[in-house]
Amino acid sequence: MKFLFSCLLGFLIFWLIPHFTSAQVHFTHQDTLRGANTPQRAWWDVVFYDLHVQFFIDRKQIAGSNIITYRVVGQPQDMQIDLMQPLTLDSAVQDGHALSFHRDGNAYFIRLQSPQPLHRLKTLTLYYHGKPHEAIHPPWQGGVTWTQDSLGNPWVVTSCQGFGASSWWPCKDYLGDEPDSQQIAITVPDTLIDVSNGRLRRVVSHPDTHTQTFVWFVDDPINNYDVAVNIGKYAHWEDVYHGLKGELTLNYWVMPYHLKQSHIQFQQVKSMLKCFEYWFGPYPWYRDGYQLVETPYLGMEHQSCIAYGNHYENGYLGRDLSLTGWGLNWDFIIVHESAHEWFGNNITDKDIADMWIHESFANYAEALYVECQYGKKAGEEYVIGCQQNIQNDRPIIGYYGVNNEGSEDMYYKGGNMLNMIRQIINNDSLWRQILRGLNHTFWHQTVTSRQIEQYIIHKSHIDLQPVFDQYLRTTNIPRLVYAFQGNKLYYRFTNAIPHFHMPVDVVIDNRTYRLQVNTQWQEMSIYLQEINIVLR
C-alpha cells in the first residue's frame, strides 16, 4: 500500500530554505521625495506629457522641454518636479509667466502664481539641459547608455526602471500617476534614427543643423520608466499578428547586420502573443502596436517598445534559468519582457515596493508559455526548476514610500507562489478567468498589492490571505511536520505565521484526500500495513 503526500508546491512545504535577517534599513529625506506621493505631488494629476529632447551625442549631453498638462485634484501648493542631478532645470513657465523655484536634491519645488481651480486643466512648461546620469550596468543600474554598434556607429539608449525617469527628463517621477497619453519628440543627427514608444507620427528634418526630429505618440497611459529612447543606425521590418482585437502591427528595429537573424528569431513573437492572449486577455496596446528594438543591454519592458539584447539566442543569453532544458527552446527576453505588457505596463504597481505584481507574474508567464508550447507537465517542471534561484534573503514586498524594491525573490519565489495558488484553486478554467479578469478589471491602471490579492481571493472564493502574507511579507518557509501513532496521522505546519493554512493532497491507494493543514496539530485515521511516503 502506498501513502503519498502530493505537495502543492514541494519546496515551500518540505524544503526549509535557510532565511537571513536583513540588517536594519535606513532611508533618507531624498528617498521619501523620490518614492512617496508627497503633498506637492498629490494635488495634481498628470494628463499629458509633451516631451522634446535633443541628444548631443559627441558631448553626452541633452537639452529639451516637457510641457505638462495636469488636472487639479486637491488643494494647490508648490509643485514637485523631479529631475536628477547633474541635470539642471532652466526655467518653468505657466500662463506666460516665468515661475520661481528651489531645488532640494533631485526634486524642484515650483511656486505657482496663476489660480489653480479644482478639476481644471492647467499647463506647465519646463526647460532643462545637462549631462544625464550615465548607466553603469544597464538595465539594473539605469540612466543613459552612450556606446557604439559593431560598425562604430553611435548607439544611445535609455533604461531607468527603479532608478527613475527623472534621470533624463523632468516629470512627476511617481509610479502611481500616469499620463493618459504622451508625445515623445527626439532630435538626433540626421544619419541616425530614434525609436520610441507608440507610433511614429512624423519625422521633421532640420537641414541647417543636420539633425532630424522623430515624433512618437503613445495613445494610452504609460508609466514614466517605460518611456524610452533608442538612437542608432537601425534597420526596420514589419509584420502583423491577427489577435483577439484584430490586426496588431509588429515593428522590429535591429542592427542591419542582424536583419536576417531577427527575421528568424522574432517569429517567436506570434506564438508568445497567442499564448498570452489566451491566458491574460487581449494585448493591451493595439492602438500603439508592438515593437522589439535591439539594444546594447539585455532587455527591458518599455511599453510597446520592448528593448531586446539577447543576441538572437534562445534561453537567457544562451542559458536555461530553470536547468530543466525547457528554457532553451525559446527566447527569454521576448517572452519575459513581453509578459510585462500585461503585468507591469497594463497593470502597474503604485509603489515599487509592490513590484512582485510585475515580476512574479512575468516569471509565471514564462511557465505558461512553456505549457502552451509543450504541455502542462513541462510548464510545471519549468516553474519548479526555477526554485533553485530563490535566495529568501528578505521579504518580496519592500518598504513603501521610499522607492524601495523588495527581494529579487519576486521573480522565482513569486512565480512559484502563483503556481501554488493555481494548485490550491484546482480549477484551471477559473484560474484563467482570474488572470484575464485581472487585466480586464485593472485595465490601464496603477494598483496596490492588496488590490491584486483581494481580487484573487474574491474570485477564487478561497481565503488566500495567509498565503500572500506568508510568502510576500515574510522570509519564513512553512514546513509540514507529521507523525504516526497507532492508526492516526498527525500533521501541522511550523515556521509559519499563526493564521497560516493551506491544503495538502494525500494519496492513499490511488485515492486523493485534500487535508486543510494549519499551524495546529490535526489528526486523520489511517490504516496501512506498509507506509511508503513519496514527496513530489
Image (cartoon, rainbow, N blue to C red):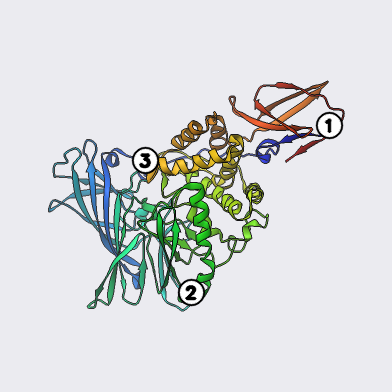
Spatial CA distance of label 2 from label 3 is 44 Å
The residue depicted at 52 percent of the width and 38 percent of the height is 24
User: The disc labelled 1 sits on which kind of residue?
Assistant: Ile
In the image, 486 versus 171, the foreground residue is 486
Q: Which tag, 2 or 3, sits closer to the chain's start?
A: 3
Q: 507 above or below 143?
A: above
Q: Which residue is mark 1?
A: 531
Circles 2 and 1: CB atoms closer than 8 Å: no
Compared across the picture, whether 200 is left or right of 7 comes to: left
Q: Which tag, 2 or 1, sits closer to the chain's start?
A: 2
Q: Which residue is mark 2?
A: 259
The residue depicted at 72 percent of the width and 41 percent of the height is 536
In the image, 280 versus 314, the foreground residue is 280
User: The disc labelled 3 sits on which kind of residue?
Assistant: Ala
Which residue is farthest right?
Answer: 529
Spatial CA distance of label 1 from label 3 is 56 Å
Q: Which residue is mark 3?
A: 36
Circles 1 and 3: CB atoms closer than 8 Å: no
Compared across the picture, whether 453 is left or right of 48 comes to: right
Q: 394 above or below 344?
A: above
Closer to the camera: disc 1 or disc 3? Answer: 1
In the image, 12 versus 351, the foreground residue is 12
User: The disc labelled 2 sits on which kind of residue?
Assistant: Leu
Circles 2 and 3: CB atoms closer than 8 Å: no
The residue depicted at 30 percent of the width and 49 percent of the height is 180
Closer to the camera: disc 2 or disc 3? Answer: 2
